Image: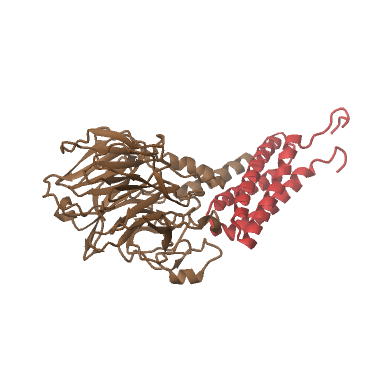
Chain colours: A brown, B red
Amino acid sequence: MSRQVITILSVSVLAAALAACSNKAPQVDQYGATPEMPAPKRDLMPDMTIAKPTAWGDSVPTVPAGYRISAIATDLGIPRQTLVLPNGDILVAEGRGGNAPKLKPKDVIAGKIKAKGNTAVKSGNRLTLLRDADGDGVYEMKTVFADKLNAPYGLAMIGNVLYVANQDALVRFDYVEGQTRASAAPVTVTELPSAINHHWTKSLTASADGRHLYVGIGSNSNITERGMAAEVDRAVVWQIDAATGAHKTFATGLRNPTALAIQPGTGALWAVVNERDEIGPNLVPDYLTSVKEGAFYGWPYSYWGKNVDERVMPQDPAKVASAIAPDYALGSHVAALGVSFSGPAMGAKFADGLFVGEHGSWNRNPPVGYKVVFVPFRDGRPAGEPIDFVSGFHGEDGLTRGRPVGVTVDPRGALIVADDLANTVWRVTPDTVAAPAAPAASPPAPVTP
Amino acid sequence: MASSPFLHPVRAIHPVHAAVLGGVLPLFLGTLLADYAYWSSHEIQWSNFAAWLLIGAMVMTTLALLCGVVGLARHRHGLAYVVVLAVTWVLGFFNSLHHARDAWAVMPAGLVMSLAGTLLALVATWIGLSTLRAGGVR
């Protein structure tokens, strides 16, 4: 009798929990300047739909007609961001950072589940250099440019100085064209906020005039669950003087600015930002935005302008009133981790706009992201829906073969995509190579001051 | 019971059962107090304490429930005890899921469920330990 009672109770609890997991999220129109914003909701359990990783084998990601894709480097140590050097060599930052302690029982469980969707290889903590000496599209040289770095992520070059944003510091190397190995240990430009490092990636780009570096520093929590004291100097973009290492806060309220780029022509700073989780499958859209100096973009108090997040206590109505909305929604939970402005060398259809690498969701059913999209621009502003440029990372079979991170346009006519699940670097090229354009389109653009 | 309690002591509740049941109420109470501290101070660390105390409460409730089911089969105690403990467990399970939310999203339902859990734990302990009285005395 009592066994039946218990059995019935246990079964109904499990059924309720499972029902919460199996609801397919409704699709909403969440692209562009005015995304649809449903009411916040939280199911019994967060809807964790983890990618089931599998190898690419002989298959490759899908690219539009008139383009081809090939793997130019494999067996890397978690490639994240890439930089095309003036001579065409490619630097790949490899590593895994973060040392956030597990604070709640939930962190222990969620950590184990999320790890299933990520690579298990050891963090490279290095820069690998790839070279295609004869220009046949095969990068026959793969060599370690610098190692013993602390989870390097953002890369930029100003003149003959290479800057690397480690998870705890901005460092620089002197660079000579054609070099395949750093000649000395890196010099620290400035320390970066690194306590806890819940969001550890430090994105980086250099200003068009070569005087400043911008570093994106992610928040130390999803939504202040580690306390506000942990959020000092977090969820911000720093502007750093390249000559002195002095910094100032350039913009705030950007939850996790995972990639930065300078717009060719205008010199404006743009960022892709990952927004908060656990208020529904269609909240909050990750976004692409130009970053205005001194602006507050909402985190943690509000999202997409002035939509108050009631999970933050105490609230701050004055900060909410000052929050501005970003420029362009990319969709909730797509996890944008890469951004790069395009140029004429990428072909007419994909010349005016930028590419965004979407790592893919872990808490949405059906999963989203897992692709590289092209956001078309007109008159220097995003115009129109994103177009799939590289897809097939998450297959129809429910298996995941790769997860895009950094994207970099090679001004010679190629898109370089880092894949941190397959530990591969992909290269997408137009079939008919357009006349080589002046190398002006690649962010972070090599700059000669 | 016909036999002498001195030769065959009547163990209405097994000592291990008593020990785990004895842990249920303090841990639910600890959860409630930590939740209340977060409610009144907005200091996030109390919410972390509450979540872990609740895990402790659930471990003890699960063990007590297992002992209760075994005891039920051996006619050591009545159905009411096991049912109250089972309800406590179900509420604690939902409360644990709720405490997995971030920051203030735990409130106010987390606090309410912790209060209800504490009261249920008190009732379950009351019924469960009532059988401790030595044979003969009612």
Kindly identify the residue that appears in the image at 18 percent across and 55 percent down. Answer: A351
User: Compared to A175, does B42 lie above or below?
Assistant: below
Q: Which x, y percent locates residue A386?
A: 26, 56
Image-based side of A331 in relation to A22, left or right? left
Residue sitting nearer the eye, A70 or B11: A70
- Residue at image position (83%, 41%) is B133
Horizontal arrangement in the rendering, residue A318 relative to residue A143 (left or right): right
Q: Is residue A423 visible?
A: yes
Please state which of residues A418 and B23 is positioned toward the viewer in this rendering: A418
**Residue A284: x percent and y percent?**
40, 59
Which corner quadrant of the image does residue A350 belong to? bottom left
Q: Is residue A187 left or right of residue A5?
A: left
Is A288 above or below relative to A70?
below
- Across and down, in percent, residue A26 comes to 36, 56
Which residue is nearer to you in this view: A207 or A340? A207
Q: Can you give x and y, in whole percent of width and height, for residue A48 in the image?
A: 44, 47
